[in-house]
Amino acid sequence: MLADMDAQATVPVKDLARARTFYEQVLGLTPVGGDAMRGVQGYRSGASTLVVYESQFAGTNQATAVTWSLGGQFDAVMRELKAKGVTFERYDLPGIRMDGDVHVAAGSRVAWFKDPDGNIINIGNY
């Protein structure tokens, strides 16, 4: 039923204007569609869409909200995000070792950071 359909990530934020600054200027996403009057903004990310919308529940999720698979671009993206002031999270996870801000296990290199509302974002070399 849904296997052949595109899916999109949907991320709640408290302040759409503040979120737009982060998602557009820090992450470099291009706005598509959206309705500021209704508190909704879409972003193109590769072949998919990320939807950011205003919600009183923004930042309450304690798990990863969005993941980007970066492959060989992982280190370059890490450097660019750091240069833009992104602070990376450090999690104590079984079987994972830290290499600076990067979590490493079995050939995978991953990092997590938060948007201004505390939504957890993940990037990885997968």
Image (cartoon, rainbow, N blue to C red):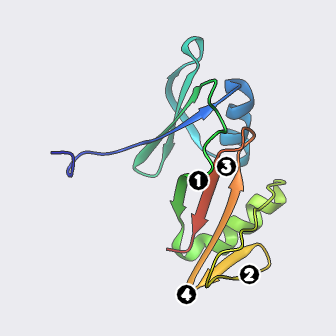
- Residue 42 place in picture, x, y as percent: 51, 32
SS for tag 3?
A: loop
SS for tag 1?
A: loop
Cα separation, mark 3 vs mark 1, equals: 19 Å
Q: Is residue 70 above or below residue 44?
A: below
Cα separation, mark 3 vs mark 4, equals: 25 Å
Q: Residue, x 61% and y 85% (percent of image)?
A: 95
Q: Residues within 10 Å of mark 2 (few under 14, many from 20)?
A: some
Cα separation, mark 4 vs mark 2, equals: 13 Å
Tag 2: amino acid:
Met
Cα separation, mark 3 vs mark 2, equals: 24 Å
Q: Earlier in the sequence, mark 3 or mark 2?
A: 3
Q: Which residue is mark 3?
A: 27
Q: Tell me the mark number nearer the camera, choosing from 1 and 4.
A: 1
Q: Which residue is mark 4?
A: 107
Are the residues flagged by discs 4 and 2 in contact, CB closer than 8 Å? no
Outermost residue to the front = 94
Q: Which residue is mark 2?
A: 98
Tag 1: amino acid:
Ala
Q: Earlier in the sequence, mark 2 or mark 1?
A: 1
Closer to the camera in the image, 30 or 82 = 82
Q: Residue, x 66% and y 67% (percent of image)?
A: 111
Residue 62 in the figure: left or right of residue 86: left
Q: Which residue is mark 1?
A: 63
Q: Is residue 84 above or below residue 69?
A: above
Q: Earlier in the sequence, mark 4 or mark 2?
A: 2
Q: Earlier in the sequence, mark 3 or mark 1?
A: 3
- Residue 4 place in picture, x, y as percent: 20, 50
Residue 25 in the figure: left or right of residue 121: right
Are the residues flagged by discs 3 and 2 in contact, CB closer than 8 Å? no
Cα separation, mark 1 vs mark 4, equals: 22 Å
- Residue 11 place in picture, x, y as percent: 55, 38
